[in-house]
Amino acid sequence: MQAENTINANCSEDEAASNKSNDTKAAVHETGRHSMHNAVVAGMLSAVAFILMFIEVPVPMLIPSFIKLDISDLPALLGSFALGPIYGVVISFLKNLLIILIKGTGSAYVGELSNFILGAAFTFTAGVIYHKQKNYKRAVKGAVIGALIMALISVVTNYYVVYPAYEKFFGLPMNVIVGMYQAIFPAADSLIKCLIIFNVPFTFIKGMIDVGICFLIYKPLSPILHGRK
């Protein structure tokens, strides 16, 4: 009787160990599948962002024509909400890397660097705020704050990096750059005024256009983004 109990106990232990092993294998398999899905979606979104970089519209009545409106941060915002904030940064990076590798740089790489910094700040901020408590209000709050941060950072990147690089590498005098802004609004008589009066609201509106489209298409795309049937 005692031997039978011992055998039964050993069988129960073996069964428990087997179930635990199977659960571990299933968890590892699910984690691997999830990671693979995220990588595939991030790659797809990066490709779409790359294509959207070529669809840009000048708005010369609102800002100098060398600055154009595009929605190439939209895929990174989708990725940040669906996959996590790090993926927003990754997609922003891959988009600019593809531009450099396929199209080449037309700005001594500073344009691509600035685009990456701004897009990463925007999408990472939105994703972090949303993922702390996933609901619609948090998504809106994160997206608006992210767009605002992107707009403010644009002053720093343009003032210290982009426009000085244009002056140094392309021989474009700063007074000529400022003059392009003054042609629209004569009171913008310094670079910092130009950036605050024009670039900050322009960049914020650009971000909010991305946000508006994101909220329109996020739900229909959710099965693809999350790998659900």
Image: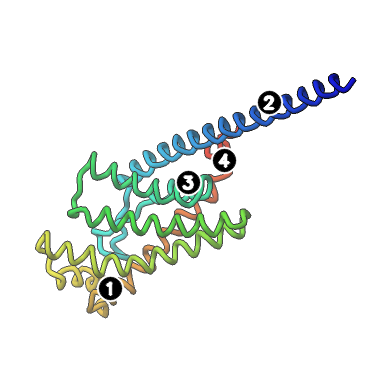
- In front: mark 3 or mark 1? 3
Q: Which residue is mark 1?
A: 194
- In front: mark 1 or mark 4? 4
First-in-chain label (2 vs 3): 2
| Residue at position x 54%, y 48% in the image | 216
Q: Amino acid at mark 3?
A: Gly
- In front: mark 3 or mark 4? 3
Q: Position of residue 43 (x, y in %)?
A: 40, 38
First-in-chain label (2 vs 1): 2
- Measure the C-alpha gap from mark 3 to mark 1: 32 Å
- Relative to the observer, which residue lies in front, 120 or 193? 120
Looking at the image, the residue that sits furthest to the front is: 2
Q: Amino acid at mark 2?
A: Ser
Q: Is the residue under label 1 in contact with that under label 2 (CB below 8 Å)?
A: no
Dot 1 alpha-carbon crowd within 10 angstroms: few under 14, some 14 to 19, many 20 or more: many
Colour theme: rainbow
First-in-chain label (4 vs 2): 2
Q: Which residue is mark 4?
A: 222
Q: Identify whether 44 is placed above or below 203.
A: above
Q: Is the residue under label 2 in contact with that under label 4 (CB below 8 Å)?
A: no
First-in-chain label (3 vs 4): 3
Q: Amino acid at mark 4?
A: Ser
- For the N terminus, the quadrant is top right
